[in-house]
Amino acid sequence: MGNAYLTGLDRNRANYAPLTPLSFLARSADVFPHKTSVIYNELRYTWGQTAERCRRLASALQKRGIVKNDTVAVMLPNIPAMFEAHFGIPMSGAVLNTLNTRLDAEAIAFTLDHGEAKILLTDREYSKIIAKALDLMTGPKPVVIDVDDPSYVGGAFLGEIEYEAFLAEGDPGFEPAPLDDEWDAIALNYTSGTTGNPKGVVYHHRGAYLNGVNNIVSWGMQPHAVYLWTLPMFHCNGWCFPWTMAANAGVNVCIRRIDPKQIFALIREHKVSHFCGAPIVHGMLINADPADQAGIDHPVAALIAGAAPPAAIIEGMEKLGVSITHVYGLTETYGPASVCAKQAEWDSESLAKRAELNGRQGVRSLLQEGIDVLDTMHFQPVPHDGQTMGEIVFRGNIVMKGYLKNERATDESFAGGWFRTGDLAVIDPDGYVKIKDRSKDVIISGGENISSIEVEDVLYRHKDVLAAAVVATPDEKWGEVPCAFIELREGADPTQEELLEHCRAHLARFKVPKLFIFGPLPKTSTGKIQKFILREKARSAEAIG
């Protein structure tokens, strides 16, 4: 009798289907074909129309020779084509690679080469940087398809066909091949290159499906939510929210760029119920013109992540009437994988205390198996005392497959049976995780990771720089910005403007230090720069105007 459950109870088509977020789109199109799916300026699509456009995209890609596990890259803002790419590209069997629109041409070229992109969809706004990136590529160049957003004036066409004409080539009745394995890759996202070149993080259909649902459950989203796209869809696939909104059969309100006045106007006009963003976005809303903030009389919920948000940000958003939930994760965890789950007893605390409690990285989200803080010496859990530091680790289905073409980095990140984040934290007595420091000296500015090593390497290439160390300094707008401490060669006397221009020539703009401080660098007896001393100095320094 002990083996009865092992015979005759096999997996088959009737009782098993691989998990894929593509099923969310199919369901919403079947059940709610006439409900609004996308709003962008005067443009409106229904879920039936969005599904048809995605089928056309998948069909057109296959007609151009795209096969399973080919990479299709996109360089797009938060417009309808970007949302459609999250379904149409994987429906074709390809892997979606959303490019960070804030990166320089060198980084884009590396990404296109490393990911072996066969096709690239790009908006006219980025034509200059894409043209340079294509010239810098060392491998075969992708076929370029231009996306012509009528609301943008400028730029140039680089490809042989425009997006709408490309969709017209596709079959509206296209039927994607059934997914054989939910472990198949669905997306490729690149880290911000915190240790040299960016690493390609591979997502699978299973994880995308689960985090898509996880967002609904952990946030308590009601059906048919109205979601404003203030979070870049290129960033961890918009924290999986394109798939979330298809599961929710909600409304995607697209916005091309972050503008507080427009954000408040859209919230009022469309009764936006949910949005996400890094602390910088929330800070911009808090500091917006009070006239723009006025007139919102319905419940609005927001997720905040990125650098640990200052309590003042959470407090400020609550004063605006926006309910804030803090989440934490990395590119390697599909975006948010932990949540600062609110406890009922926190409601009786002062606003300042609630903001402090809500500012922690929290506990594992519902569909993530585990989060812990392990001491870096013995890799054992730290006590829940709010004092003992260790490294944050994750385990579960909402963790990447691994790094593309980088087996060594993959093995290192999974050492010990956990995904090692590199972030140092404590666990409070109530079991909530709170970040204290970052083991890799990563600077998180406006939600984007900046490697101090990368910036230092650029500074060291300046003829007048003897030694350089880069640390984070607080910034009201960006959360953190790079601060460079420079030890000059004897007799050298460069201006700050000279160093600024040097960095601007070799770094993306958001990675350029906002502050330069000259003088001898504090070192240990073995010559190692003591960054903890510099961090203290940077906290009281004033950024360049």
Image (cartoon, rainbow, N blue to C red):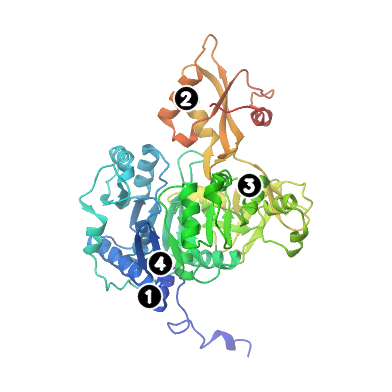
Residue that numbered label 1 is attached to:
33
Residue 37 numbered mark, or none = 4
Mark earlier in primary sequence (1, 3): 1
Q: Secondary structure at mark 4?
A: strand
Residue 134: image x %, image y %? 29, 41
Q: Secondary structure at mark 3?
A: helix
Name the N-terminal-most of marks 1 and 2. Answer: 1
- Distance from the alpha carbon under mark 3 to that under mark 2: 30 Å
Q: Which numbered disc, 2 or 4, marks the residue closer to the eye?
A: 4
In the displayed structure, does residue 200 sit left or right of residue 146? right
**Residue 478 placement (x, y as % from top left):** 55, 40
Please name the amino acid that badge 2 sits on: Leu
Q: Secondary structure at mark 2?
A: helix
Cβ–Cβ below 8 Å for labels 1 and 2? no
Question: Callout 1 environment at 10 Å: few (<14), some (14 to 19), or many (20+)?
Answer: some
**C-alpha gap between disc 2 and disc 4:** 45 Å
Q: Are marks 3 and 2 in contact (CB under 8 Å)?
A: no
Q: CA distance from mark 1 to mark 3?
A: 39 Å
* In the rendered image, the vertical position of residue 160 relative to residue 480, given as above or below: below
* CA separation in Å, label 3 and label 4: 31 Å
Query: In the image, what residue type sits under mark 3?
Result: Ile
Tag 3 residue: 313
Q: Which residue is mark 2?
A: 500
Q: Of callouts 3 and 4, which one flags the residue occurring earlier in the amino acid sequence?
A: 4
Horizontal arrangement in the rendering, residue 166 relative to residue 214 (left or right) = left
Residue found 24% across the figure and 45% down from its top: 157
Q: CA distance from mark 1 to mark 2?
A: 53 Å
